[in-house]
Amino acid sequence: MVLVLDASVVACWILPDEQNARADLSLNAMETTSAFVPDIWDYEIRNLLLMNERRGRISPETAAAGLSFLSALPIGAERIGNMDLVLDLARKHRLTFYDAAYLELAMRKGAALATLDTALASAARAEGLETV
């Protein structure tokens, strides 16, 4: 099985007060499967950490530890494929362009989509994809 990981799942791995059994399953699955993200993922993760620093939820050291943890994982970043298709998917499923990029990548890879975002998961299922 190939996985596409969205930021909602990864947040549970790097934010100390976020726990989720489905996110844990995705992390454990990476021992035996390939994982991919669209290249916007790096921006999303760093923004997520920065916003949580600003809210006083984590320290810069916790953010750095999270980034270090992620850099050690076998996650492949891929350029966004067909931008017009991503836009069409965003319109069709009322997603942000960013979320539609995860959907497009999962479709292109024939991958399961690991997400905790209910709208994105619903869109993936509507497109015939497995969700984690």
Image (cartoon, grey):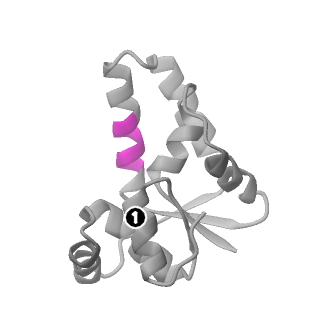
Q: Relative to 4, is 16 above or below?
A: above
Residue placed under numbered mark 1 in the picture: 120
Residue for point 51% across, 27% down: 64
Q: How many labels does the image show?
A: 1
Residue for point 27% across, 65% down: 95
Q: Is 126 covered by the magenta stretch?
A: no
Which is the main secondary structure of the residues drawn in magenta? helix
Q: Is 47 covered by the magenta stretch?
A: yes
Q: In which quarter of the image is the N terminus?
A: bottom right
The location of residue 33, given as percent across then percent down, is 72, 67
Residue for point 58% across, 75% down: 130
Is 99 placed left or right of 111 in the picture?
left
Q: Relative to 84, is 78 above or below?
A: above
Callout 1 crowding tier (Cα within 10 Å): few <14, some 14–19, many ≥20: many
Residue 73 visible in this rendered orientation of the protein:
no
Residue 28 visible in this rendered orientation of the protein:
yes
Q: Relative to 15, is 26 above or below?
A: below
Residue for point 37% across, 62% down: 119
Residue 32 placement: quadrant: bottom right
- Nearest the camera: 131 or 97? 131
Q: In which quarter of the image is the C terminus?
A: bottom right
Residue 117 placement: quadrant: bottom left
Is 84 placed left or right of 60 in the picture?
left
Extreme residue toward the right, this view: 32
The location of residue 29, given as percent across then percent down, is 73, 59
The location of residue 9, given as percent across then percent down, is 53, 49
Instruction: Say which element carries label 1.
Output: helix
- Nearest the camera: 118 or 10? 118
Q: What residue type is labelled 1?
A: Leu
Give the magenta range: 42-48
